[in-house]
Each structure stands twice: as C-alpha cells, then as structure tokens.
Image (cartoon, rainbow, N blue to C red):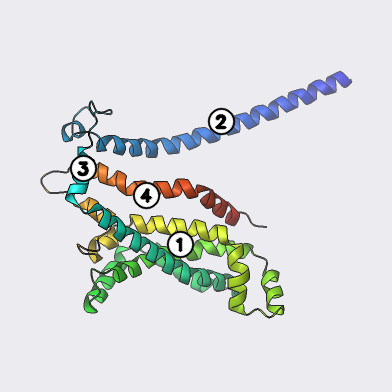
C-alpha cells in the first residue's frame, strides 16, 4: 500500500513538473515570437549603417555587407552638427521630464488622496488625444508671443507627453501607500505638503525613477512637435535624421547610421538603469 502511494505521489509530481515545463516553454516561445521582429529590425538597421547604397538597395536583399564601411557614420558628422543637436535633444528631454515630474507628482498625489477621479480623467483624455490636435494651437501661440524656434516652446510642448505619463504611472504607486503613514506625520506636526515631500515621495522613489526614465525616452524620440516648432539652432536628433530624406533619393546608409546614433544613448541609459525600471514598474503593479 505504501509503495503504491509513493508511486502515485511520484507520478503526480512528474505531471506537475511536466505541466510547469510546458507552461515555461510556451511563455518563452511567446516572448520569442514577439521579440524576433523587433530584434530583426534593430539588427537590420545596424547592418544598413555599414553597407553601401548599392547593397542597401540591392534585390534580393544583402543581409551581411561584403566589406563593412564607416563612410555612413562619417557622412552623419559631416552633414549635421551632431554634438550640438545631441545637446539640443538632451536639453529638451531633461527640461520636459523635469517639468513633468514637478507638476505630475503632486497632481498624482492629490488625485489619489482627495479622490479627484475627474481630474485624472482629464489628464487621460489629454494623453489619448492625437498630438497633431495640439500642434496648430501651440504653433500659433508661440509664433504670436515670439517663442517659436526656442527651447522654451518645444519643452513646454513636450510636457503634453511627459505630464500624463507621470500622473498615470504615479497614481498606482501613491495608491499603494498606506494613508496612516502620512496621518502619523501630520500628528507630529507635518503639513500636507510636508507629508507629501518627506513621507510619500521618498517611499515611491523606485516608481519616480522608472517614470522619469520613460518620460526621458518619450521626449527624446518625439518627432511631430519638434519638426514644426524648432529651428536650425534648436532642432533635436529626430529632426536631424529627417534631413537624409529627399525627393530624389533616400540615403539609406547615412539614415540608418543616424538612427543608430540616436538610439545609442537611450539604449545605454536603459541598460544601465534597467534594474530601476523593473523595480519601479513591479513595485507599482502589485496591490493588496
């Protein structure tokens, strides 16, 4: 009898392990299916940056260049002032992210603590509305007050992107905080703002870091606002890449090289701070 029971337990344990293995294999297979197209496009872009125009336009496609060349990267630095344009992108992204955090963090806290669901809905609608809907009013406004082609104009416009992201991501983090912590601080003489600044904000630091990184990436990659509201001295990297497109021909090699150079800072930032991103997003994802 004991031997039979032991056999049944072993069989059940084997079934459980088999089921878990199948679920794990199915999960990684699904991840692979979704990742392969994106990874293929990324490596195809890198390959194009080392190929000549003849190889980039060849049919059938040439996947591996016969003799890799760095002429495309040299053309990028010759055609545009890459370092100045990179500085423009950095100023715009950091400015938009800073304003988004400065306004969005208190807004998310107030929405949670004072149950301002309507305000949260308004912010969500602002994020859902297509960016082109804001472009013409912003353009007319900045042109009338003389701020067109300035850092201020494009930074304030990018706040439309960063502010809703900050508010809606941070709402989840503030909801996870026990209200009793702030009430205890207020009993000890802390003000409402002090409770936010000294108690709530330090406790949601992982979420704040993750949100700041996402806002920085969104602002860095934005094109539609930048191509209209910036000029020669303030244009960011996505607009500079646009200069490699012409009516006669598309310079695929320099275009891919410029795209790689634009992606590189964001990729490095993500690799170095991926721990903070994962920690922040998983912290706000679990409730109860």
Residue sitting farthest toward the right: 1
**Left or right side of 53 for 267:** right
User: How many C-alpha atoms fall within 10 Å of the one at disc 1: few (<14), some, or many (≥20)?
Assistant: many
Q: Nearer the viewer, mark 3 or mark 4?
A: 3
Of the pair 77 and 100, the residue shown nearer to us: 77
Give residue 40's position: percent from left, percent from top. 36, 35
Q: Is residue 182 positioned above or below 203 on the image?
A: below
Disc sitting over residue 82 in the figure: none
The structure residue drawn at horizontal position 37% and vertical position 61%, both measured from the top left corner, is 93
Disc sitting over residue 265 in the figure: 4
Instruction: Identify the secondary structure beneath mark 4.
Output: helix
User: How many C-alpha atoms fall within 10 Å of the one at disc 2: few (<14), some, or many (≥20)?
Assistant: few
CA gap between label 2 and label 1 equals 34 Å
The residue where tag 1 is placed is 165
Q: Is residue 130 visible?
A: no
Disc sitting over residue 25 in the figure: 2
Q: Which mark is first along the chain, 1 or 3?
A: 3
CA gap between label 2 and label 3 equals 45 Å
Q: Nearer the viewer, mark 3 or mark 1?
A: 3
Disc sitting over residue 74 in the figure: 3
Q: Nearer the viewer, mark 2 or mark 4?
A: 4
Q: Is residue 143 visible?
A: yes
Give residue 232's position: percent from left, percent from top. 19, 62
Residue contact between numbered discs 3 and 4, judged by CB atoms under 8 Å: no
Instruction: Identify the secondary structure beneath mark 2.
Output: helix
**Left or right side of 46 for 94:** right
Q: Which mark is first along the chain, 4 or 3?
A: 3
**Left or right side of 129 for 242:** left
Instruction: Identify the secondary structure beneath mark 3.
Output: helix
Q: Which mark is first along the chain, 1 or 2?
A: 2
Residue contact between numbered discs 3 and 1, judged by CB atoms under 8 Å: no
């Amino acid at each position: 009898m004991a031997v039979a029971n032991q056999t049944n337990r072993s069989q059940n344990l084997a079934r459980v392990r088999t089921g878990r293995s199948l679920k794990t294999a199915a999960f990684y297979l699904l991840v692979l299916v979704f990742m392969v197209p994106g990874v293929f496009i990324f490596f195809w872009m890198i390959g194009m940056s080392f190929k000549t125009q003849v190889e980039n336009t060849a049919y059938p496609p040439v996947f591996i260049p016969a003799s890799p060349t760095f002429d495309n990267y040299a053309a990028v630095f010759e055609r545009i002032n890459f370092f100045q344009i990179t500085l423009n992108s950095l100023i715009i992204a950091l400015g938009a992210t800073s304003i988004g955090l400065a306004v969005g963090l208190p807004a998310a806290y107030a929405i949670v603590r004072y149950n301002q669901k309507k305000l949260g809905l308004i912010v969500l609608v602002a994020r859902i509305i297509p960016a082109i809907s804001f472009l013409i009013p912003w353009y007319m406004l900045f042109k009338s007050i003389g701020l067109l082609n300035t850092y201020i104009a494009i930074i304030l416009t990018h706040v439309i992107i960063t502010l809703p992201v900050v508010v809606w991501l941070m709402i989840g983090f503030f909801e996870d905080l026990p209200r009793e912590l702030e009430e205890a601080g207020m009993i000890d003489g802390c003000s409402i703002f002090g409770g936010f600044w000294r108690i709530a904000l330090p406790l949601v630091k992982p979420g704040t870091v993750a949100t700041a990184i996402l806002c920085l990436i969104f602002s860095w990659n934005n094109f539609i606002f930048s191509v209209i509201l910036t000029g020669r001295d303030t244009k960011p990297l996505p607009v500079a890449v646009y200069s490699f497109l012409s009516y006669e021909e598309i310079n695929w090699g320099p275009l891919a090289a410029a795209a790689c150079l634009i992606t590189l800072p964001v990729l490095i930032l993500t690799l170095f701070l991926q721990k903070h991103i994962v920690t922040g997003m998983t912290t706000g994802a679990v409730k109860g």
